């Protein structure tokens, strides 16, 4: 096989994307209480352990008063971990928040210097009795 044909054959092979993940990426959550809590799952697809920071934003991308109960997650290679985001409801019937996880490599350690961010959008529905 000639070199250009080999390169074309390799390009044509399906490639699996290794992307960090947040699940679910979009969902509605309902509460009857004055507070809410949502459980999300973060995935580390990288070959090294990664540290992920969790940030919660309001719909207009201002920092939210809602917080992740574990704002920093350390996830082993190719593993997932679940975490909670909690906050107070307000007078609105529906409120949207964005939850973002940002990976950062461990400083001074071997492995890939990988930085990435993924965000999901969640609606908090306030139910009244």
Image: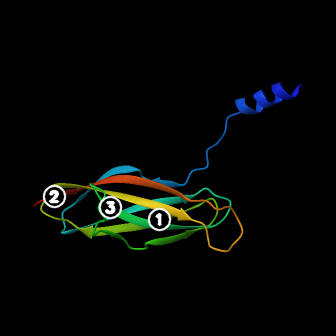
Residue bearing mark 1: 82
Q: How crowded is mark 2: few (under 14 residues within 10 Å), some or many (20 or more)?
A: few
Asked if residue 58 lies left or right of residue 39, the reply is left
Asked if residue 107 lies left or right of residue 102, the reply is right
Number of numbered markers: 3
Establish if 6 lies above or below 44.
above
Residue bearing mark 3: 57
Asked if residue 34 lies left or right of residue 114, the reply is left
Residue 72 percent coordinates (x, y): 48, 72
Mark 2 or mark 3, earlier in chain: 3
Mark 2 or mark 1, earlier in chain: 1
The residue mark sitting in front, 2 or 3, is 3
Residue at point 16%, 64% (across, down) = 90
Distance (Cα) linking label 1 and label 3: 19 Å
The quadrant of the picture occupied by the N terminus is: top right
Distance (Cα) linking label 2 and label 3: 22 Å
Residue bearing mark 2: 127
Q: Residues within 10 Å of mark 1 (few under 14, many from 20)?
A: few
Q: Which colour scheme is used?
A: rainbow
């Amino acid at each position: 096989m000639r070199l250009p044909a080999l390169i074309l054959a390799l390009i044509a092979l399906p490639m699996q994307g290794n992307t960090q993940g947040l699940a679910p990426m979009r969902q509605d959550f309902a509460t009857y209480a004055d507070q809410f809590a949502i459980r999300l799952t973060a995935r580390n697809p990288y070959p090294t352990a990664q540290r992920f920071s969790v940030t919660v934003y309001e719909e207009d991308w201002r920092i939210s008063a809602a917080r992740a109960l574990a704002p920093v997650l350390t996830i082993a290679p190719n593993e997932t971990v679940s975490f909670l985001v909690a906050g107070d409801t307000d007078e609105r019937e529906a409120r949207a928040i964005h939850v973002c996880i940002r990976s950062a490599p461990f400083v001074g350690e071997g492995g890939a210097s990988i930085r990435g961010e993924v965000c999901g959008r969640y609606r908090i529905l306030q139910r009244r009795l």
